[in-house]
């Protein structure tokens, strides 16, 4: 297919940089929008645009968006921000407003918006529509699954040290509980860490869930909304993934298995495929991939 011009918002974030790299591999032209877009490196088809989405006018953003065939919103607010929820919601509002204005400006093509959510915005099967972010048993299962992933713990150690320390301690308590000297103290330690982890500030996850309401049932512009599964994080590029067309949280096939997930490189493949095909318009969907290789890999690759 012919080369696309794709604008990636949050181009140097954990997810954004994997998307940029995948798009460049396919021969597309990429504009990276973020505060420090050159942190990812340089490439003849990569055009850095240094700006803060929240501090830029809708008209200026629209001018940038109007030049693109596809806009991918991978904007992320650090979980450590005190105003995470507010920033998450306002950034989505800003991007959508600018995108709709850009679509009205373009006379040569119709741009397509790919919005990235998270597992919290997926509905837990069998709960009559409860989102994962509002379902406490989901967070308990997430903690239990995350504690089994070396790659995810390594990622947290770099990005969220306090969370990583709790996951590591929890993992050690689980191993001790499964050992020959198991006692009630280990069980109480496990319960304590589960309580601490499920009581953390997940405002950005809630913000993504709320932001989906901007899209749900809205056919006034061309969008798709993809929410990664629970165990999304660093990992190997396998080149394969499974699409789940409905907005339900993927669950393990067998009781006791970890929650399904996908690596960042494989999610980037799914996003790049959608940028090329535009086959999921007005759909909230997710993807899963192989988790057989739990090796610790480079989390912030460069071009």
Image: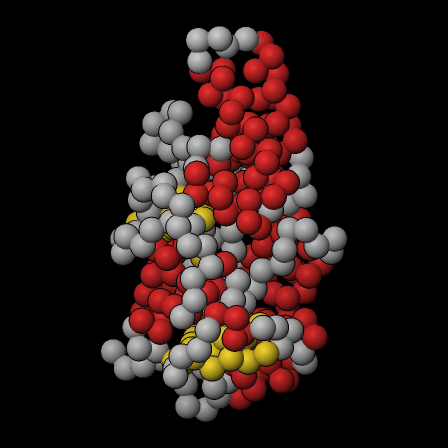
* Left-right relation of 137 to 17: right
Q: Is residue 189 above or below residue 120?
A: above
State the image quarter where residue 137 is shown.
top right
How are the colours assigned in the image?
Answer: secondary structure
- Give the residue drawn at x 60%, y 12%: 185
- Give the residue drawn at x 64%, y 23%: 192
| Quarter placement of the N terminus | bottom left
Q: Is residue 260 above or below residue 68?
A: above
State the image quarter where residue 257 is shown.
top left
Image location (x, y in percent) of residue 65: 52, 81
* Left-right relation of 35 to 263: right
* Left-right relation of 10 to 94: left
**Residue 97, visible in the rendered structure:** no
Residue closest to the far right: 82
* Of the pair 111 and 8, the residue shown nearer to us: 8
Q: Is residue 20 above or below residue 234?
A: below
* Of the pair 28 and 158, the residue shown nearer to us: 158
Residue closest to the far left: 1
- Give the residue drawn at x 64%, y 84%: 59
| Quarter placement of the C terminus | bottom left
């Amino acid at each position: 297919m012919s080369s696309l011009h794709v604008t990636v918002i949050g181009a140097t974030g954990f997810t954004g940089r994997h998307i940029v790299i995948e798009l460049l591999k396919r021969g597309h032209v990429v504009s990276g929008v973020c505060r420090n877009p050159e942190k990812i490196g340089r490439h003849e088809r990569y055009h850095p645009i240094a700006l803060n989405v929240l501090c830029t006018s809708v008209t200026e953003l629209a001018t940038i968006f109007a030049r693109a065939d596809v806009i991918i919103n991978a904007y992320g607010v650090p979980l450590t921000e005190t105003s995470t929820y507010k920033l998450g919601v306002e950034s989505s509002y800003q991007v959508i407003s600018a995108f709709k204005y850009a679509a009205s400006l373009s006379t040569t093509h119709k741009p397509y918006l790919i919005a990235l959510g998270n597992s919290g915005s997926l509905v837990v099967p069998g709960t009559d529509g409860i989102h994962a972010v509002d379902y406490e048993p989901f967070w308990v299962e997430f903690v239990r699954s995350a504690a089994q992933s070396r790659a995810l713990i390594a990622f947290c150690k770099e990005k969220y040290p306090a969370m990583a320390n709790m996951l590591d301690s929890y993992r050690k308590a689980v191993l001790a509980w499964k050992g020959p000297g198991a006692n009630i103290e280990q069980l109480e330690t496990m319960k304590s860490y589960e309580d601490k982890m499920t009581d953390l500030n997940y405002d950005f996850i809630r913000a993504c869930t709320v932001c989906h309401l901007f899209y749900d049932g809205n056919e006034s512009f061309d969008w798709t909304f993809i929410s990664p599964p629970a165990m999304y994080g660093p990992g190997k590029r396998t080149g394969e993934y499974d699409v789940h067309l409905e907005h339900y949280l993927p669950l393990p096939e067998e009781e006791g298995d970890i929650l399904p997930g996908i690596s960042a490189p494989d999610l980037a493949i799914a996003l790049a495929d959608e940028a090329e095909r535009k086959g999921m318009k007005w759909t909230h969907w997710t993807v899963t991939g192989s988790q057989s290789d739990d090796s610790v890999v480079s989390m912030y690759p460069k071009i």
